[in-house]
Image (spheres, rainbow, N blue to C red):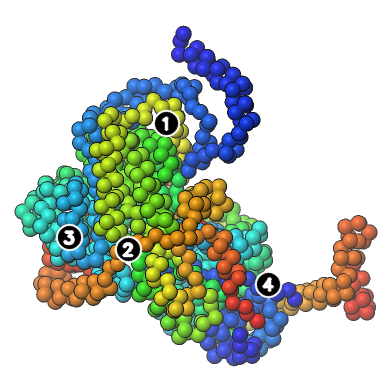
Amino acid sequence: MPKIQEIARGVLAGDRRSIARAITTIENNSPKAQELIASIFPHTGNAHIIGLTGPPGSGKSTLIDKIIREYRRKGKTVGVIAVDPTSPFTGGAFLGDRIRMQELSTDQGVFIRSMATRNYLGGIAKATKNAAKVLDAAGKDVVIVETVGAGQSEVEIIKVAQTIVVLFAPGLGDEIQAIKAGIMEIADIFVVNKADRANADKAVMDIQAMLQLNNKEKKWKPPVLKTAALTGEGVPQLIERIEEHRLFLEKKFERKRSREKAEAELVEAIKEKVASSIIEELKREGKLEEFLQKILEKKMDPASIAEKLLNRKFGKQV
Amino acid sequence: MQNQRKIRVLIAKPGLDSHDRGAKIIARALRDAGMEVIYTGLKQTPEQIVETALQEDVDVIGLSILSGAHKTLFPMIMELLKQKGLTDVLVVAGGIIPEEDVPEMKKLGIKEIFGPGTRTDKIVQFVFENVPKRT
Amino acid sequence: MSDKEKINEIAKERERWEKTTLPKWIGQSPERKSEFRNHSGTLIKRVYTPEDIKDLDYMRDLGFPGEYPFTRGVHATMHRGRLWTMRQFSGYGTAEQTNQRFKYLLKEGETGLSIAFDYPSIRGYDSDHPFSKGEVGICGVAVSSLKDMEVLFNGIPLDKVTTSMTINGPAAMLLAMYIAVGNKQGVPMEKLGGTTQNDVLKEFFAQKLIIFPPKPSLKLVTDIVEYCTKHVPRWNPISISGYHIREAGGNAVQELAFTLYDGITYVESCLERGMKVDEFAPRLSFFFAAHNDLFEEIAKFRAARRIWAKTMKERFHAKNPRSMWMRMHVQTAGFTLTAQQPLNNITRVTIQALSAVLAGTQSLHTNSFDEALALPSEEAVRIALRTQQIIAHESGVVNTIDPLAGSYYVENLTNEMEERTMEYFRKLDDMGGAIPAIEKGFFQKEIADSAYEYQKEVDEKRRILVGVNDYTTEEKQPIKVLRVDPKVEEEQVTSLHKLKSERDNKKVNEMLEKLHYATEKDENLMPIIIDAVKAYATIGEICDVLRKIYGEYKELIVI
């Protein structure tokens, strides 16, 4: 296996094998992952990262296939990260999204990577964000992240993507119900796929009605589009809207959002670093078991232990 | 930090045949053994298989073929893997591959051929034991 | 004593037997397993008695052969009159090689032909397409154009044989070629007899050799039915197939239920087209697998006939008894063949074939013992055919009709098959039909689960496969397998290129344009496809026109 700096250089040069290896390194949380991210970080921020979420059967992968084709027609390069769930029982996963895009797998301007959640919650994997950065640093113009699409709380995508497309298909049951639960707030564009189905127009109207109730003071009014992923109908219009949203984000008043995102990322990174350094230390000292026992015996609560450990580490009240 | 390495496997069906019963059962067995399994469906060209293996950075490729075209397609796949530098990937195969073809296939670099009637746990075990170690 | 009293008496006696006689025996030597189940998961009782068929009404549920509900058979004389058609699926290499094999089989006493096409032909590609590399003539005969079809039937008069074609996506093109060959031989299409499989629905979840999406696929099927009803009256336009559902991993109940439900879908599609049920339904035929569990299979075939008859009568209000007939072709289950100790397969095939005969099949293919290894050799094919002949002429099972009727066990199983099938029907109706069920992955999931369960049973030795997970031997039986010469591809490609340079290409293009136009206008495509193949347009060219308009289907993968 090549050295991490070689991989980083490879990524920046757009070498496909290096990109693949870099993502694996991040996914596996290898000791060198941090070094890798640090090396590529200055070269990120050029790609437009699109998140695509929606319930199972709404046609996410098929739509992405058509979106890629449209971008390719425009001469853009595309990276895709398709996330599927890890089984909580076996730790294994079946990754089958790319089958819909498989014809594009030999296009050198396209890079598709399947990713298992590895029990991370929120519809993506822990490594998704940094994997998207790898594709960004490797020079992809557009990076599309397909979420698991299983639940209603897939809001983690907001931490990864700049433009979030929420997909529905008529006839899947309580689709509108799904919008109410959180996703409403994060959606930048709504798409009703399988537009050839009978109740597509009704779904569009339902969403629009709900938007009127919810989005009064927002500067960006999320549009509601119709597509037919099988034929590609409506996809050029979707790309136009995505592009509009990108331009909107570039305007100054939306800096706030980028700032919030940076802050969230920093907070999360600190949490993780601090937590893992303390836990590792306890393990090294063989004290982890001791503290766990205290909790089990109800002698000390977890928060008090945490405070004590922080005091010990930083030598002052936090 | 915890290392979360998982074995990643590509199950691929080259050729035009559609007998995917075996491929799917293997995919399921490997998944249930804790691996991450990428299955790309039927009718995959050698180029698609190798490109997928590269992008997905898999440790293992399982090829399943029952059409009899293995003598044409397997050499193409193995040659492309070499060209792309994917020489450290474990390649195994299954399906209807006559006994007398096995030595020739192994010479190409296919580590093992699992014929009809192979127990799935044997295949899982083989993968665990032979998956290349990565640093 | 009334019937009810008799049953009560038997029940009492059974309880006594279970309390007194049985424990003594079980005490001395316990039963081999705590429970016995068949492939569909039915718990099999120790012994069956009149209690288990107490609700059976002879005239309502069985009747007489040739009469509703046809449980006992579709003909009044069954195999006492005509034996079933012994139809061996075959094809490999070039059309010329397969023509030789056909002639050999006919000489050996086969009574109908059955063409196995190679994968490129099945998937609608010509032999020179990049996808065809390494596949030409390997798993069947390569047919790219009418030229190949002419060679395939050289010296075989089409008014003397019936021909079955295992073809789905490009069924219209190959039927068109068959009609064109007949035309050249001077046999009008009214006289052509045979079957096109043409069952696209099961392709989406079982066989998966799909070209077009569900809706246009169903449209093409309906075109063929409509055309044949009017012009090729002796042709069976669809062979509604459970075989592949079983081979993909489904159990006997799933095979039965999904196949018959596909049948319902075709009937509905034809009715929507404006056809009358009694015009087309008599020509619908079926195709099932015969697996190892003898009685389960027999029950399945008998239940199939009864359910279909009732469905046609009650759901579709058919009047013509022939519309209620289920005529079936059966093939022994290829999946059960083992690569280990391959000669054992002869025994398996015999048992499987026996189930089909005992249950009154119209047509039968017996697999060759070497098919888990490669295409069958001539010797293996002959033994397979001889197996049918031995059953027909030596076993005596054909001397009476439906000999297992009245068996407490078989009748009980038959009833259960029917009940479980009706449950699936209700579920599928609730889902909105077969196409929504395909789109939801319902069939796929059911089949994948059964396949995985079966494999686990084998792996864990809960199910014994002789020579595979028990009674194994290191010794290898030397089997000479048939090899297709790789030169076949070269020859085939050369002759295809020659054809493409010699035919009237202006006419071909004109036909393809017409086809394009007719497809866009949603006309019945059979007439124009016949014209196109007569001009020597190839399968690939014709399918390309349709691909452009209909798109290509991408499978929904359910593991």
* SS for dot 4: loop
- Tags 1 and 2 touching, CB below 8 Å: no
Q: Amino acid at mark 3?
A: Asn
Callout 3–callout 4 Cβ contact below 8 Å: no
Where A134 falls versus A178 (above or below)?
below
Alpha-carbon distance for marks 1 and 2? 39 Å
Q: Nearer the viewer, mark 4 or mark 2?
A: 2
Assign the C terminus of chain A to one quadrant of the image. Answer: bottom right
Q: Chain of mark 3?
A: C
Residue corresponding to mark 3: C99
- Which numbered marker is on residue C410? 1
Q: Earlier in the sequence, mark 1 or mark 3?
A: 3
Name the outermost residue toward the top.
C1
Give the vertical position of C249 relative to C154 (above or below).
above
Question: Which of the two discs, 3 and 2, labels the residue nearer the N terminus?
Answer: 3
Q: Which residue is mark 2?
A: C481
Instruction: Characterize the local packing of mark 3: few (<14), some (14-19) or many (20 or more) Cα atoms within 10 angstroms.
Output: many
Work out how far the residue at label 1 is from the one at label 4, CA to CA, in angstroms. Answer: 55 Å
Q: Which mark is residue B4?
A: 4
**Residue C407 in the figure: left or right of residue C105:** right
Amino acid, disc 4: Gln
Q: Position of residue C302 (x, y in %)?
A: 36, 34
The residue drawn where x is 58% and y is 74% is: B131
